[in-house]
Image: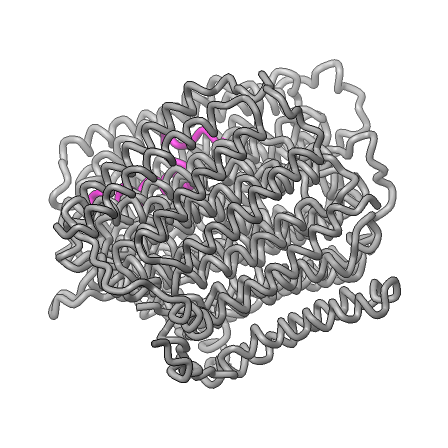
């Protein structure tokens, strides 16, 4: 069994959803129920294999890659099919594997207009393959391919099943991300051509991420590293999204269907931050050192800007989208410190934000389905009309604003703390200022979330919705889709060690260059 | 400088003047038929130049193909399409100035390039090039091209018939 | 004086010439069948044409298996890996074009057998082009593939736009030939030989420094002449009108095979004929490439007709393919990278562009139009065609996992490999242009998926796609996907060298 998992586990977990999508394409469009079953089965199959991997994972050695597969792929450009997971990939992989089946479950009776569950569910599955592949790929070109595979399904999900402005939002999303990836690819190629063996000085000419992390930019001049890092910074930064590349996010979130928003928030945004931690920082340490103060600056600008943006929003989904910008700011601040503490916090923040914001978008979607609007001033009295849903909104908002004891806290608080003493070589004073600003950001976060809660959940229902039969409490489907996320929020809040224990050894490996 | 070379130079000068004048008249005349006839003179001049250079094959080809076939076809075309036989004001294009400018520029660039490269090169003609050499080359080094041309002519023939038919 | 006995019959390697001879024989057979059977020949002409192309594939495969490079007539005609790969690309492209034409030509008001005769003649010219290594053979091959193409563009005789297409293409093509020929004659004048290898030896010789002006002029004219053929900016003016007016399968043929043939000639010329004069051709091709990419993409943004849009996108794609030539002279390793990347691009481009035209032909059966607006709501009534079109468009845009990404990737890899500033800048231009191009490809995709069908299009029933067009779609679709997911499959074959 272990042998099988070692050789095939990661391949299986990556391509099981794609296989499901292919099977669905052979089933006639009319058989909606079959489609749902195939989609659920495929995503659950991936989850089961993933769970086996999780159980079998050697937690003592979380710092080194496990289940490594290394086969030939594109020999002409020295690119190989290399998969593997360590403590950094593992939590994100698990997050993806859990969120996607929940989205399929939620879509059971929530296929947005104009319908066509076959296409909708296939896209979710293709998306899953892309996301998992990105987290397990250990070759830059393979990483790039998976990173891009995610684009198209999301483009169509927003474009076809989105709201009024879907065409504008989907093309904006597509163009922004592709612009970023074009620069990212140029940086990858620069790494390929310039990296050399630290001992012999021979050019390496490899895309193997393990090797490139090990040599840590050897043979590349500091100035060149700064330029290469800039390309990656834009590529990953657009995806995160970092201020000032974030403008696609509110549009995409507002127009995307519920499930699209959930996947976007829970997993897609993490591809960017994961790229920083996995690729940019360990492969270009000198470039990272120069860029990190600026990234920290953009991160805190994002925190404040996102929070202020939230206060100005009149649409619930747009508000949550801006809160994502702020939360990803905390993650990037953690990364920017280049400390063990900060990067661990960042990874925790990714998982926590994935669960919490995903859950918030689920709730927003369900509210929209009942009220047919997300305009905050038309909503109100959710606690009266749908008390359980109201309480859930309250609970998740608390988690989102970083209440101790819930998952959100462990992403934000250590990230802020870590800014107190950034890695050697980074300007301490500047980062302490960032710390103070970020702390102000948490207060603002409490402000906009409580305000949101007050305007939507509290009070009495507006007259136009007072006697509306459509407004029912949480349905069984919704409970099934949401319960795992709610459990996650509490569990990781109470026992953050579950994640920190896994990530820490891997983070130490990534930061070898900075920890001496 | 030998006498022969002097004679060649004299004849070259004469032919060149005739060709230049004919070429200019060819594009300035407003009568299409006259233009074609001026063109005959240009081609005849170039054939004469080839003779001066000892390339009898090219000279004969020039006469046969350009004067014998192309100009005759051209005149047939003029007559069959019922174009005006006399002076035609519409022949004068409005873009003459532009065309003249381009022509002068191109001539200047090409003339300068040729002058710069070959002005101090002396042409040596030991022996006139003979038909036999050309035919040997066609049936050895250029055999593929030669065979390809036959396919090309057949294809062009078939295609032209299809396009020209009225159904 | 002239010793007739002195003529020695040049040795001919029949195996090396077998692909061309097979095609020639089959083409002659097709003509004969047409003459003897008259009307009845129509029924078999398409089948016979497709079998001719497949039959010509057989010797290509045996030559590839054999693997030795063969040269005839003192190297004027060479069969090596490069020429074999390109022969295979041309034959398969033509095969797909026959599949696309079968129904279109039979149902329309066309001369049928003669159409396939034209097609086979043009393909024969392309096969000759892949092996031609001297100026005369290159020029004749160019004419052999161009003249049938001019005629095919005007094949829809009753349609004035088709007439216009053919005439424009013809006039511009002849003009380009004249320019090209003048350039060739200058190069011959300098080197005294039509063989490309001799030309390279002469013009890179230090004694040739005095002849620099003529060499430069000759190179410029030759490159410009082929610039017309591959529709590079600013020599692309004929392409949109010719593409729009010509029968759509012919457009597919022009945009893929004709363009590729121009590139094959350009590649032989640059790598065999001019390689040592990189100081002359590199800046020239750099400019041509950057202008084509940017100009083509910017003009494609404004198009309202899918065929015209593909014409301008073809201009941009020509720019991508010209790009590696702008650094090809840096070193022999770079030259190999550059050549491989262009050949890879040509192979993948053939699959994805033919696929896009297959969808356009299929959709036009319902909408009778190639206007981009008529693609609105296609997903509602033709989901399979929509998915196929999306795959092809995204492949053209270079989005993984569809074939095009690897093509672009190889181009950028070749551009960056010498590490010169010019190469890096051009790599950046390629990247930037990929983003611009995405906009117009994605626009069609979002029309198909997002919008509702227009009122004048009957959208209640699915589109019936003829079997041959379906076959073409499946073939090109599978190739596009396979080359994107396992690029090694194409990379293995296109790893060729001309030096």
Magenta residue check for C178: no
Residue A178 left/right relative to A359: left
Which residues are drawn in magenta?
A: A226-249
Image point (61%, 64%), residue name: B151
Q: Is residue B146 above or below residue C403?
A: below
Q: Is residue C356 above or below residue B128?
A: above
- Residue C340, given in percent of the width and then of the height, sits at 39, 63
Residue C346 left/right relative to B5: right
Magenta span: predominant SS is helix
Image point (38%, 54%), residue name: C411
Image point (60%, 79%), residue name: C58
Q: Is residue A256 above or below residue A44?
A: above
Residue B81 left/right relative to C294: right
Image quarter of the C terminus of chain A: bottom left
Magenta residue check for A233: yes
Along the line of sight, which residue is nearer the eye, A247 or A385?
Answer: A247
Image point (42%, 32%), residue name: B23
The image quarter in which residue C53 lies: bottom right
- Residue C159, given in percent of the width and then of the height, sits at 76, 38
């Amino acid at each position: 069994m272990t042998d099988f998992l070692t050789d095939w586990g990661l391949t299986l977990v990556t391509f099981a959803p794609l296989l499901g999508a292919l099977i669905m394409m052979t089933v006639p469009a009319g058989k909606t129920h079959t489609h749902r079953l195939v989609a659920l089965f495929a995503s659950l199959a991936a989850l089961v294999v993933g769970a086996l991997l999780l159980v079998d994972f050697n937690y003592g050695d979380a710092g080194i890659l496990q289940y490594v597969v290394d086969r030939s792929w594109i020999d002409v450009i020295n690119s190989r099919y290399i998969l593997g997971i360590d403590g950094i990939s593992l939590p994100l992989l698990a997050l993806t594997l859990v969120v996607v089946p929940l989205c399929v479950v939620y879509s059971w009776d929530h296929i947005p207009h104009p319908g066509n569950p076959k296409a909708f569910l296939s896209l979710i599955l293709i998306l899953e393959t892309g996301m998992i592949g990105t987290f397990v790929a250990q070759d830059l070109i393979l990483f790039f391919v998976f990173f891009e595979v995610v684009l198209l399904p999301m483009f169509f999900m927003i474009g076809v099943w989105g709201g009024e402005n879907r065409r504008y939002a989907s093309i904006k999303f597509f163009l922004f991300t592709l612009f970023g990836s074009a620069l990212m690819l140029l940086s990858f190629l620069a790494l390929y051509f310039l990296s050399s063996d630290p001992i012999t000085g021979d050019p390496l000419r490899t895309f193997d991420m393990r090797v490139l992390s090990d040599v840590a930019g050897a043979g590349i001049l500091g100035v060149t590293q700064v330029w290469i890092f800039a390309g990656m910074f834009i590529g990953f930064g657009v995806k995160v999204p970092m201020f000032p590349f974030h403008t696609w996010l509110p549009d995409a979130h507002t127009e995307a269907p519920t499930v699209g928003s959930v996947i976007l928030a829970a997993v897609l945004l993490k591809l960017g931050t994961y790229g920083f931690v996995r690729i940019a920082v360990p492969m270009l340490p000198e470039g990272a050192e120069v860029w990190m103060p600026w990234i920290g600056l953009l991160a805190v600008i994002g925190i404040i800007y996102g929070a202020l943006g939230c206060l100005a929003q009149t649409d619930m989904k747009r508000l949550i989208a801006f809160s994502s910008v702020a939360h990803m700011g905390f993650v990037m601040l953690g990364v920017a410190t280049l400390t063990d503490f900060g990067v661990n916090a960042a990874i925790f923040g990714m998982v926590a934000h994935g669960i919490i914001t995903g859950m918030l978008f689920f709730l927003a979607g369900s509210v929209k389905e009942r009220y047919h609007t997300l305009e905050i001033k038309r909503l109100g009295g959710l606690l009266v009309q749908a008390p359980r849903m109201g309480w859930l909104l309250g609970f998740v908002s608390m988690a989102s604003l970083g209440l101790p004891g819930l998952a959100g806290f462990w992403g934000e608080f250590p990230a802020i703390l870590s800014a107190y003493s950034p890695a050697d070589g980074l300007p301490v004073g500047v980062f302490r200022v960032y710390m103070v600003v970020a702390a102000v950001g948490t207060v603002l976060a409490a402000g906009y979330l409580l305000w949101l809660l007050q305007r939507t959940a509290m009070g009495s229902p507006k007259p136009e919705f007072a006697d509306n039969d459509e407004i029912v409490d949480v349905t069984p489907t919704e409970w099934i889709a949401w319960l795992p996320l709610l459990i996650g929020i509490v569990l990781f809040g109470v026992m953050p060690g579950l994640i920190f224990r896994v990530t820490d050894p891997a983070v130490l490996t990534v930061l070898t260059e900075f920890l001496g | 400088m030998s006498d022969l070379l002097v004679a060649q130079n004299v004849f070259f000068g004469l032919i060149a003047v005739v060709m230049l004048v004919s070429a200019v008249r060819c594009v300035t005349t407003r009568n299409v038929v006259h233009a074609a006839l001026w063109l005959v003179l240009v081609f005849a001049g170039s054939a004469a130049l080839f003779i001066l250079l000892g390339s009898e094959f090219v000279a004969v080809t020039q006469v046969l193909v350009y004067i014998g076939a192309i100009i005759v076809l051209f005149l047939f075309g003029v007559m069959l399409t019922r174009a005006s036989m006399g002076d035609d004001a519409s022949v004068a294009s409005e873009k003459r100035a532009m065309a003249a400018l381009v022509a002068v520029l191109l001539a200047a660039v090409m003339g300068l390039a040729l002058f710069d490269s070959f002005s101090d090169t002396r042409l040596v003609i030991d022996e006139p090039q003979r038909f036999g050499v050309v035919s040997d080359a066609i049936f050895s080094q250029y055999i593929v091209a030669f065979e390809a041309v036959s396919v090309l002519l057949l294809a062009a023939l078939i295609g032209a018939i299809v396009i020209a038919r009225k159904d | 004086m002239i010793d007739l006995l002195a003529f020695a019959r040049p040795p001919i390697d029949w195996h090396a010439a077998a692909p061309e001879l097979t095609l020639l024989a089959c083409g002659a057979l097709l003509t004969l069948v047409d003459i003897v059977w008259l009307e009845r020949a129509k029924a078999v002409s398409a089948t016979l044409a497709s079998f001719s192309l497949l039959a010509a594939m057989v010797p290509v495969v045996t030559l590839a298996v054999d693997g030795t490079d063969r040269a005839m007539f003192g190297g004027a005609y060479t069969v090596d890996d490069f020429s074999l790969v390109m022969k295979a690309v041309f034959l398969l492209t033509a095969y797909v074009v026959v599949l696309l034409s079968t129904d279109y030509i039979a149902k329309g008001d066309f001369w049928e057998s003669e159409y396939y005769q034209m097609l086979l003649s043009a393909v024969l010219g392309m096969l000759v082009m892949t092996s031609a290594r001297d100026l005369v053979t290159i020029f004749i091959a160019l004419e052999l593939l161009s003249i049938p193409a001019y005629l095919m563009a005007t094949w829809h005789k009753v349609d004035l736009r088709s007439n216009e297409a053919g005439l424009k293409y013809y006039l511009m093509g002849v003009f380009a030939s004249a320019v090209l020929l003048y350039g060739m004659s200058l190069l011959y004048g300098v080197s005294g030989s039509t063989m490309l290898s001799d030309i390279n030896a002469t013009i890179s010789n230090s004694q040739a420094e005095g002849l620099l002006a003529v060499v430069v002029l000759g190179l410029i004219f030759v490159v410009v002449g082929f610039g017309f053929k591959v529709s590079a900016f600013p020599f692309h003016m004929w392409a949109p009108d010719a593409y729009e007016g010509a029968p759509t399968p012919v457009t597919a043929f022009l945009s893929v095979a004709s363009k590729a043939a121009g590139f094959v000639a350009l590649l032989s010329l640059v790598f065999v004929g001019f390689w040592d004069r990189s100081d002359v051709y590199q800046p020239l091709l750099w400019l041509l490439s950057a202008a084509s990419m940017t100009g083509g993409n910017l003009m494609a943004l404004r198009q309202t007709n899918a065929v015209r849009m593909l014409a301008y996108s073809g201009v941009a794609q020509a720019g991508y393919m010209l790009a590696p030539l702008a650094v090809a002279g840096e070193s022999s390793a770079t030259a190999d990278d550059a050549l491989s990347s262009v050949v890879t691009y040509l192979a993948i481009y053939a699959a994805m562009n033919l696929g896009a035209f297959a969808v356009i032909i299929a959709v036009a059966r319902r909408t009778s139009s190639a206007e981009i607006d008529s693609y609105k709501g296609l997903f509602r009534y033709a989901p399979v065609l929509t998915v196929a079109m999306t795959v092809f468009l995204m492949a053209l845009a270079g989005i993984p996992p569809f074939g095009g990404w690897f093509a672009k990737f190889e181009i950028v890899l070749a551009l960056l490999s010498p590490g010169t500033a010019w190469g890096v800048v051009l790599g950046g231009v390629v990247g930037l242009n990929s983003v611009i191009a995405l906009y117009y490809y994605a626009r069609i995709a979002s029309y198909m998926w997002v919008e509702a069908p227009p009122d004048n299009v009957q959208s209640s029933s699915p589109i019936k796609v003829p079997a041959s067009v379906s076959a073409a779609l499946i073939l090109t679709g599978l190739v596009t996907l396979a080359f994107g997911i396992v690029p090694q499959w194409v990379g293995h074959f296109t790893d060729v060298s001309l030096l």
